[in-house]
Image (tube, rainbow, N blue to C red):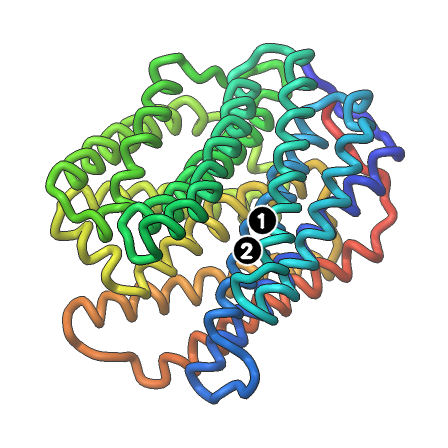
């Protein structure tokens, strides 16, 4: 059984860790808004492609990495193991990497500066994974520990795609299918491996905290693994449109649907009970879980090859799905769990920020998928579509500004489960 203890020593490191991650997201939202404004008015001196690279790298390698790794560190490890100097190095290196990637990508796109700082992030990720796996061995063997361990494994595996890009580009060229396959390999095992497994590990830990562990049977765990491997096929189907690729993806999404339905049956009774304790946590958690369900339903629909082709040929669907995964099923669930543990601020300012965050997410998803459906049916564009989605996107920097303001104001002692 775990307990909740007030440990003031962990408050400042935990707040710094998540505040830096949220700062990365704040900058990413600014870049995202600039990208959407560029469809309304020209932005002299700024490259859309460079902004896109800066936005995506800060969101994935800054924000998402920091909140999931921080959740692992401050929620799944006992206090005595969090003080390793290795974690301080990880924090410092990834902070430097995020700053460098932000400036580097805006300045030059993919170049020596941006690639150099991406490499700094990889070093930080490898150091974190090495130390965390070492520390995790000393903790109780549970389903969430197993998911956390495999999240780190998939983090390592995903980086193989990055290391393959250089040799493939120099030998086969930038237009070769293997070049695109290596990029999609990294993204697939980041989103659906490292980050999704990490979110599930934190969720199961939260559900198991009061002496009533939610155990994931081995057949469900290995079904999850099989679905992860098979659904990589969709990521390469647009560059390698072979029938066998679509069939592999179809098998993967069917397995995934069955696995998550069974996981939900195990976890739902506990989620319904525990989510009633805090209104803010409940709202964020339920929207996040609804996003996870929507993600799985959308992926299940692409088991049909014709639908699979539509899913990657209409840009609005691609962006909507990425945000559904990143902002919805990963960010909202993890924020809810960190808020419940007092690692995210709980104040009037922060709560208004969470509301704006939800409104920005729901409204932009509605516009992205709605516009995608109109394009699919050949009905053109919504009136003032670009102005509408730009206006809704402004809710994200507003929300993160309020959340960061609450971070700097708070000095409360953090309740950390150990």
Q: Position of residue 385 (x, y in %)?
A: 36, 80
Q: Quadrant of residue 376?
A: bottom left
Which residue is found at the position 79% from the left and 37% from the top? 88
Q: Picture quarter containing residue 124?
A: top right
In the shown orientation, is residue 331 left or right of residue 229?
A: right
| Quarter of image, res 74 | top right
Rendering coords of residue 201 (x, y %): 54, 28
Q: Residue at x 51, y 26 (%)?
A: 153
Residue 112 versus residue 264 in the image, above or below: below
**Numbered disc 1: secondary structure:** helix
Numbered mark located on residue 253 in the image: none
Q: Secondary structure at mark 2?
A: helix
Q: Is residue 143 visible?
A: yes
Taking depth in this image into account, of 341 and 88 the one nearest to the observer is 88
Q: CA distance from mark 2 to mark 1?
A: 5 Å
* Residue in front for this viewpoint, 332 or 255: 255
User: Percent x, y for residue 350?
Assistant: 70, 57
- Quick check: 136 above or below 296? above
Neighbours of disc 2 within 10 Å: few (<14), some (14-19), many (20+)? many
Up-down relation of residue 329 to residue 383 (above or below): above
Q: Residue furthest front?
A: 171
Residue at the (25%, 64%) spot, across then down: 314
Q: Is residue 101 positioned above or below 227 on the image? A: below
- Is residue 191 visible in the rendered structure shown here? no
Total label count?
A: 2
Residues marked 2 and 1 touching at CB (< 8 Å) = yes
Which residue was labeled with disc 1?
A: 61
Instruction: State the quadrant of the C terminus.
Output: top right
Residue sitting at x 32%, y 22%: 223
Q: Position of residue 256 (x, y in %)?
A: 30, 31
Q: Name the residue that disc number 2 marks.
A: 57
Crowd band around label 1 with a 10 angstrom C-alpha radius: few (<14), some (14–19), many (20+): many
């Amino acid at each position: 059984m775990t307990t909740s203890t007030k440990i003031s020593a962990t408050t400042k490191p935990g707040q710094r860790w998540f505040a830096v991650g949220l700062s990365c997201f704040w900058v990413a939202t600014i870049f995202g808004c600039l990208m959407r404004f560029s469809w309304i008015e020209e932005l002299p001196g700024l490259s859309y492609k460079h902004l896109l690279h800066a936005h995506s790298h800060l969101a994935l390698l800054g924000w998402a990495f920091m909140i999931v790794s921080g959740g692992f560190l401050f929620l799944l490890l006992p206090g005595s193991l969090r003080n390793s100097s290795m974690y301080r190095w990880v924090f410092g290196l990834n902070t430097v990497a995020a700053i460098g990637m932000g400036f580097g990508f805006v300045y030059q796109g993919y170049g020596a500066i941006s690639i150099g700082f991406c490499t700094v992030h990889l070093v930080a990720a490898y150091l974190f994974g090495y130390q965390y796996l070492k520390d995790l061995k000393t903790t109780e063997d549970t389903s969430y520990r197993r998911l956390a361990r495999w999240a780190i494994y998939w983090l390592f595996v995903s980086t193989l795609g990055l290391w393959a890009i250089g040799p493939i580009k120099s030998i086969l060229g930038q237009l070769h299918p293997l070049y695109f396959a290596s990029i999609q390999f990294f993204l697939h095992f980041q989103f659906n491996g490292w980050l999704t497994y990490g979110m599930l590990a934190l969720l199961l830990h939260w559900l198991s905290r009061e002496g009533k562990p939610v155990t994931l049977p081995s057949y469900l765990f290995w079904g999850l693994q099989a679905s992860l491997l098979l659904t990589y096929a969709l990521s390469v189907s647009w560059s390698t449109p072979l029938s066998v690729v679509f069939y592999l993806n179809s098998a993967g999404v069917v397995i995934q649907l069955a696995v998550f339905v069974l996981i939900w049956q195990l976890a739902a009774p506990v989620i319904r009970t525990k989510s009633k304790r805090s209104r803010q946590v409940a709202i964020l958690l339920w929207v996040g879980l609804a996003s996870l369900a929507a993600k799985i339903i959308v992926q299940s629909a692409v088991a049909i090859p014709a639908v699979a082709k539509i899913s990657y040929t209409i840009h609005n669907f691609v962006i909507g799905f990425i945000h559904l995964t990143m902002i919805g099923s990963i960010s909202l669930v993890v924020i809810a769990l960190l808020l419940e543990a007092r690692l995210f601020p709980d104040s009037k300012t922060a709560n208004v920020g969470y509301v704006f965050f939800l409104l920005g997410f729901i409204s932009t998803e509605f516009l992205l998928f709605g516009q995608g459906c109109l394009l699919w049916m050949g009905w053109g564009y919504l009136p003032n579509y670009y102005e509408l989605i730009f206006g809704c996107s402004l809710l994200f920097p507003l929300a993160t500004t309020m959340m960061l303001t609450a971070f700097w104001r708070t000095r409360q002692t953090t309740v950390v489960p150990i």
